[in-house]
Image (tube, rainbow, N blue to C red):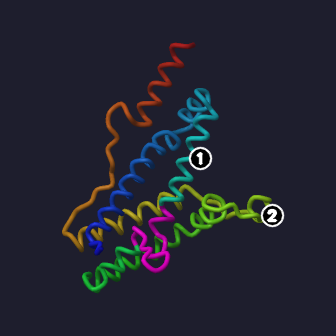
Amino acid sequence: MSISLESVFNCVNKNVIKLSYRWKIYCQLFDSGNENIALLNSSGREVFKLFQQLVLDDTILALSRLTDPPSSGKDKDNANIKHILDLAGGSLSSSASTELNTTLARLEVHVQNLRVHRDKALAHSDVKHELQVEVLPPITYDELESAMRECRTLMSKLGSELFKQTSCYDVIVPFGSGGNDLLALLSKAHALHN
């Protein structure tokens, strides 16, 4: 069965959109100021701590998958950015190819520590890490934000170059469904309780 470049692109693009949506909700909750963090801590500290860690782990896994090698062996192609670039091959102008490869190189720098965490702590249980003999490099918020920005830039450029398609990753969270809405409800509940 032949799989088209466009179908792979659409699949990967959908994953980038889903990641952008989850990250936006994460930021609404956990990157919205000390007052909101205090509100979350007073409303279910362990639940929100668990949720925060799960979303971070999910983000690390998603960004690692999106930037994995194009295949994992014979007939084991990965639905990711590098596979799209391989499939696109000669369809891209030399200037577009250069620009995409430059963006990919920046993306690789940002996901370097993410991959270490994925490989040693999330996807596998590395003995040295588990026994705390080896300390994993820290992951910074800036690495996550920068990796997502470069990922979106790459996918947007690929969509434009290959399919004359525009992409927007500024996702809209439906009214009443986002982190801001939850924070507002928690704040009202605390005000009524006091």
**Residue type of the residue flagged with mark 2:** Val
* Span colored in magenta: 63-81
The reply to whether the magenta stretch includes residue 77 is: yes
Residue 189 position within the rendered picture, expressed as x and y whole percent measured from the top left? 50, 19
Q: How crowded is mark 1: few (under 14 residues within 10 Å), some or many (20 or more)?
A: few
Q: Are marks 1 and 2 in contact (CB under 8 Å)?
A: no
Locate the N terminus by quadrant. Answer: bottom left
122 vs 78, left or right, is right
Query: What's the residue at 43%, 70% (across, down)?
Result: 78
Residue 107 position within the rendered picture, expressed as x and y whole percent measured from the top left? 46, 70
Which residue reaches farthest front? 1
Query: What's the residue at 33%, 48% (across, down)?
Result: 171
Quarter of the image holding residue 93?
Answer: bottom left
Earlier-in-chain disc, 1 versus 2 = 1
Pick the front one: 19 or 24: 19
For mark 2, what is the residue? 133
